[in-house]
Image (tube, grey):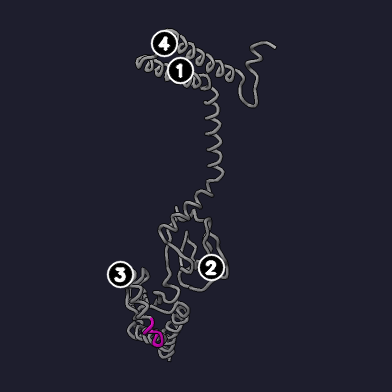
Amino acid sequence: MTWERFFSLDWGGLPAGEIIASVALVVAVALGRSLFEHTLRRREQFISEKHWRILARVKNAAFLLIVVGLFLIWAPSLKTFALSLTAFAVAIIIATKELIMCLSGGVVRVVSNSARVGDWVEIGGVRGQVVNMDLLTVTLQEIHSDGRSYEFTGRLVSIPNAVFLTAPVRNETFYGRYVYHKFTLTFEPGAEIDAMEKLVRDSLERDMEPHMELARRYNATIERKAGLDLQDVEPEIIFETTNEAKIRMNVSAFLPTRNAIRFEQNAVRAALGHLSAAADEGRA
């Protein structure tokens, strides 16, 4: 076996050349230091403080020489190892990117306290009630997302926590009992808007009468927690005109969430009934 082949052997995954050079360096430096110390001791019967300092410096110099020498010997292999380690780390990060984002999003959710179990929320365009949260996902009992209906769809939606890093989170917890419900009625020009307003308002107030006291307390609680002066619980009606020169009635009322659509339909039917009666009188 030639020396070139011997030095190129791979011993247990380690290059033979670097191993032999390292051993030779350590042995040579150790022998050199021992020889120097032995020579010094032979010349002097008693080693003075000056000589102790010389021996200490030689010892430190020998150690430094070994460190520098080993670094120079193993530098090529360390470079290859570092590149391999970096490539491995990058591969791991790429492979677990979504997992890391989900864990980070979970931390953001906990720190910001943006959602808790039982809250009504809208996350990334999905509305629902939070029924479960873990390190990776949030599970919602989905609610119709048209903004007008407050009924559950019967579907469970699992949302990865990574969404908390990129999408806004709207907490609509108070919608669970009462909601600022809005709807619109459009009339032809010449309609009796005062009569329409009275019919709609009377219908809403009649339906809300059993709930009014609780609605006021709930509204006051929301204002206190939010630190805001919110709309009153009484119905608010605003008129405007459309581009087609029609009259639009915008109605907003603080209604029980479960009954909001039914109360709206009662008010709409009252207005349509008056319009129908007026039309019959006109034809007569």
Give the labeled residue for mark 1.
62
Looking at the rendering, the stretch of residues picked out in magenta corresponds to 208-214
| Label 1, label 3: how far apart the Cα atoms are | 75 Å
- Work out whether mark 4 precedes mark 3 in sequence or the reverse, and give the earlier one: 4
Question: Nearest the camera: 68 or 60?
Answer: 60
- Work out whether mark 1 precedes mark 3 in sequence or the reverse, and give the earlier one: 1
Give the labeled residue for mark 4.
45
Residue 275: x %, y % from top left: 41, 85
- Work out whether mark 2 precedes mark 4 in sequence or the reverse, and give the earlier one: 4
How many other residues sit within 10 Å of disc 1, few (<14), some (14-19) or many (≥20)?
some
**Residue lying furthest right:** 1
| Label 4, label 3: how far apart the Cα atoms are | 93 Å
Q: Secondary structure at mark 4?
A: loop
Compared to residue 233, the image places residue 31 above or below, namely above
Give the labeled residue for mark 2.
141
Q: Is residue 15 left or right of residue 232?
A: right
| Label 1, label 4: how far apart the Cα atoms are | 24 Å
Task: Give the amino acid type for the residue marked by disc 2 in the picture.
Answer: Gln
Where's the N terminus, which quadrant?
Answer: top right
**Residue placed at 48% from the left, 55% from the top?**
106
User: What secondary structure do most residues of the magenta stretch adopt?
Assistant: helix
- Work out whether mark 3 precedes mark 2 in sequence or the reverse, and give the earlier one: 2
Residue 216: x %, y % from top left: 35, 81
* Circle on res. 228: 3
Task: Give the amino acid type for the residue marked by disc 3 in the picture.
Answer: Leu
Q: Secondary structure at mark 2?
A: strand
- Work out whether mark 2 precedes mark 1 in sequence or the reverse, and give the earlier one: 1
